[in-house]
Image: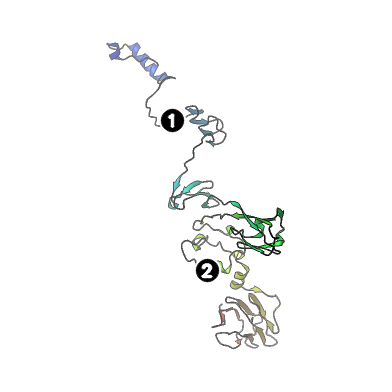
Amino acid sequence: MATIVTRSGKGSPLTNTELDANFTNLNTDKIESGNTVAALTITNLTVSNSLTVDTNTLKVDNTNNRVGILDATPAVSLDIGSATDAVHVPTGTTAQRPTGAAGMFRYNTTDTKFEGYSDGSWSEIGGGGATISVDNFTGDGSTTAFTMGGNPLTENNTAVYIDGVYQQKNTYTQSGTTLTFSTAPPNGSSIEVNRISASAVTVGTPDDNTVSTVKIQNLAVTTEKLANSTGASDGVTTAKLATNAVTAAKLATAVQARLRPELDSATAKTSAFNAAAGKKYYVDTTSSAITATLPASPTVGDSIQFIDFAGTFATNNLTLGRNGNKVLRVAADGVVDQNNFAMIWEYTGSTHGWLPVS
């Protein structure tokens, strides 16, 4: 290290030459290679080239923009492949989730699951697997049904052998844990059933306002899915759906029929006809009154729409043939006698029958 001359060390005042030398040494040789500094505080540090700490502890490769931990030659942006212990990822509750960005990864302490951010929401990272179990039986020449140790869900998840010979799937059926042969295996025969049991895959609950239109399959919203949520543990509740996410295309055919009956024909009815649930009819009574016979065995929620095609219902009425069910809460046919009438009729059950809803 460069020498700094001090007054106490010299024992007398320093000369101008010694003072100049001290300043020169301070500017050029603060810390020399090979010297150890016990403690050093640096407010800001900029390294313009690669940085190595203890050979393999930390390597910053400025040429390839890579960082290696326990690896002096990192092969990717962050390389810790030489470590054998673990990586401690960020952990926190659901409420502590950061603003999401694609590719984020953390451990959720609320759900006790790993999760990642993708496609606009946080979801669990994980999956299920499958195990193969073997059941062995002995045929007695009369027994056709055998109880397996688990439910394979379908014959396709089984492989059956009798005395080592593979059995075609059309020679037996599966229902729950019961395997039934069409013909009893021979007496003393060895029966081996290999069944695949798939473990469940848990899908994380989506965040509020994240289930958009593109995430809902067309025709997926059935009547059952329209029921109100009954608890906080339910999956896709109203809060999960983004505004305007449920379009007409996402509604199941039966739901579409209930909300907006499908046009039966572009040609108006001009004579008596049988009306079907989920249909819309143009009815032209210009020449005479017409009877539309309602379904004999409707289901609660079925709907039918009738439209006064020519504006003549007041002159020649449209009669709704009740066909054994009530119309407007009474056991009698309904009569529509208003011009320009266009209304949907919905079956509400045996107590009130068919009622106009719009």
Q: Which is more toward the observer, 271 or 50?
A: 50
Does residue 143 sit above or below 207 in this rendering? below
Which circle's residue, 1 or 2, is located before the other in the chain? 1
Q: Is residue 131 visible?
A: yes
Q: Which of the colour schemes (rainbow, by chain, secondary structure, one colour) is used?
A: rainbow
Q: Position of residue 49 (x, y in %)?
A: 51, 28
* Label 2: few (<14), some (14–19) or many (≥20) C-alpha neighbours in 10 Å: few
The amino acid type, in three-letter code, at marker 2 is: Ala
Could you tell whether 31 is left or right of 148 in the image?
Answer: left
Question: Do we see residue 336 in this rendering?
Answer: no
Rendered-image quadrant of the C terminus? bottom right
- Dot label at residue 227: 2
Q: Secondary structure at mark 2?
A: loop
- Could you say which is closer to the camera, residue 310 or residue 207? 207
Quadrant of the snapshot with the N terminus: top left
Q: Are marks 1 and 2 in contact (CB under 8 Å)?
A: no
Mark 1 crowd level (few <14, some 14–19, many ≥20, 10 Å Cα): few
Residue type of the residue flagged with mark 1:
Leu
Give me the residue at 48% from left, 66% from top.
Answer: 230
Please indicate whether residue 333 sits to the left or right of residue 165 in the image.
left
Q: Secondary structure at mark 1?
A: loop
Specify whether 288 is left or right of 51: right
